[in-house]
Image (tube, rainbow, N blue to C red):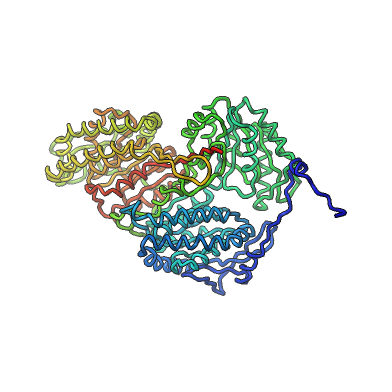
Amino acid sequence: MAGITSKTIHDIFHSMEYGPSSSSTATAQAWLESHSRALGLFIDGKFVRSADRQTCNVTDSSGGPVCSTVCAVDEDASLSVSSGASGFKAWSALPCHLRAKTLLRLVSSLQRHGQCLSELCDLAQSPSSPSALVRLLQYYSGWAQLRDSLIPDWTPRGVVVVVVSDDCSLYSLMLKVLPALAMGNAVVAIPGVGTAPPVLLLAQLFVEAGLPAGVLNVVTGSVLSLGSKVAQNPHVSYVTYSGNKKDGEILCRATAGMGVPVSLSLSLGATCPFIIFESADIDSAVDGVIETAFKKNRECQWMLCVQESVWDSVVARLKVRMAGMKSVPLLAEGDRKLVDAAVQEAQQQGATLIQPCPPSSSGAAYPPTVLCGVAPSCTCVVTPSPGPLLPLLSFRSHGEGVTLGNHSPHGQAASLWTEDLTLALEAAKSLSVGAVWVNSHSVMDPSLPLSGHKESGNCIDGGKEGLFQFLRPSSSPPLPRSSPASVDYSTFGTAASAAIIPEGSNSSSTPRSYLQYVGGKQCKSESGSSVCVLAPGGTVLAYCPDGGRKDVRNAVEAAIKVQPGWMKKSPVARAQSLFSLAETLELKRRDMAVSLHSQTGLSLEKADMEVELSIAQLCDWAARCDKERGGVPSVPQSGSALSIPEALGVVGVVLPDSSPLLSMVSLLAAAVAMGNAVIMVPSPKYPLPALEFIQVLQSSDLPGGVVSIITGGRDQLTQALANHSVIKAIWYWGSMEGCQFLQHTCASPLKSLWLHCQEKDGVRDWAQPHASLQEEMWRQAVQWKSVWIPTA
């Protein structure tokens, strides 16, 4: 036709212009019109909308109105949880195959309404692929079918609250909602603004597919205030969050002391390394960079690391590939100032720019920009700003490339590019991230665990491993709920220890003075002080060191020197060390039994039985060392994938009062068997069994520093553990105030927490080796890594 010029394929590839959009939103618009473009809350299987509620507007990419959602209030939050509690009773009582059947019906429903869902996601600026959601449903319906046969002795938690930040994707939310439902829980979902419309549509489809009313409730509004309000309800058993780190920290601190576990997946804003080795296919690697680094909606920021020998080739190809690219819309109006400031700072530090065109003087769009030659300490690397910015760094050797990749405080994922399979596997193993993509990027499948390392989260989503956050051992009662206590977080654990010789005690005999164990050596505390240990009758039995912050610091310094080497030892070598501990404990069996008898008042017969059970625990965990090794799950994409459990690093363990020897040995063995180093704080009431156990440690071949034992006040040492940035996890048995302090303090720097309030949880029966309890200990001792290796 006259006046119309057609472009050839050569012209399109040369200009790299975006083609006209052919997508229609008619189906989504019709669904919105059926709700008068005013979406209510979804509670008890139906939409609920009160006239007096405030609303929030959902806008499209041009700022135009899409619909409005309700801002829920306290009454709505309470109603959603009450509905969830009723729904849980009906849903959890169903046989596994009936729950699976319901989820499979939703697969068919989602396939029929996939066009509407896709359009709704695009309108609300929360793009997600319906096919990816179908894959999620198919995968978790299988686990709903197989829960009782493949995960015996575990039971659903109850009502689970899933919170996502405003900038989180629908896929990230459903990666938590669907496994929770598959395991038999009820869910209260609190989506972000953009995610709310598609989630409300899914909730409607769930009920139409046969999900009982109340099993899935959707509450919209301010995610942080709603999350803390809903968590206060005594019917809530678990809270899990996905989104940015700042909002995750706020939610964690707001729920501290409520007695409900909170887990965080902090993928948004994380800096992920994109590493190109000299052995890579450079053209494919640069194409991968262009595909993932400059997306408008991306859940992580990329840092490009290039080996010096191929630096010029990569830069030249980037210039060619970026030449025809257009400016990328920014997500918020205020982002432009942040992007300008980041670019200006990088240039002041010597960086050069690669841009397809100069940025406009103002506006809500910015051209894709590569910041060449920035330093690892530059702000755009450590705390990246929003916008299409890509820092480009260089490295010389393979080892330096891995070190550069580990420089970020985040540990979400990494992309490696090399044709050398040995190098790829060695680098993947050395990177402190939860997912490694070899010659690929952003590949996701629910069959593999997605575990944030370092500051990227403390929970696991995906795979069989991700199911356990929504389950509890059947032999353990539900966690009791509580109200937050009045805790001064700035002064917690700073009170002086009790007097050395309490008033009224009998000190006619000279008690023995014990030493603690740090870095493989017995030593006094840094303070030089001691506290008394009382016999059941109130007499002074012994003195033990009054450890504190400096002792924890010394123990951590010793641990970080030996833990990497201990982790790299073969499972067989670690097993031999634990068998050695068991043999040495057997030789000192009589002395340990006498110590238990004098300290706790147990009969010698029962004390001897506790020693026997402790020996058995060491042997059990030694046997497990080379049995729990992850796997090679089947994935729909071409290629192979690995699921690998890894040690956490340095773990702090605050021990319970009950079964002082058996509980210590059980927890020590679980942590050490998986390659961790541990800093153990014995019960202040019964510290002597742990101090006597030092002789067992010294006589074994366990490397010094892998285990340290520090005695003193529980609160003082808990505070020291919580505030040390190197410690990755804390297992705690203690007071309600201690649990609350840890939940509040360990939100930043982020730590994995396993908390037990001795006042409310009751006494754990350490003498009963339930399989699910041992499984729980093992899962607390590891973090997961998935590795993708494409073959086509």
Q: Is residue 297 left or right of residue 134?
A: right
Horizontal and vertical percent for residue 153? 30, 53
- 361 left or right of 761 in image: right
The furthest residue to the bottom: 51
Q: Is residue 75 visible?
A: no
In this rendering, position of residue 673 left or right of residue 366: left
Q: How many marks?
A: 0
Instruction: Report x, y in % for residue 37.
Output: 62, 69
Q: Measuring 68% from the left and 57% from the top, which residue is drawn there? A: 23
* Residue situated furthest right in the rendering: 2
Tell me: residue 509, above or below residue 204. Answer: above
* Front residue of this view, candidates 190 and 374: 190
Quadrant for residue 187, please give it.
bottom left
Q: Height in image: 185 above or below 453?
A: below
**Residue 418 percent coordinates (x, y):** 56, 31
User: Which of the image's four quarters has the C terminus?
Assistant: top right
Quarter containing the N terminus: bottom right
Question: Residue 721: in sight, yes or no?
Answer: yes
> Could you say where residue 31 lies in the image, as x and y percent from the top left?
61, 68
Of 569 and 410, nearer the camera is 569
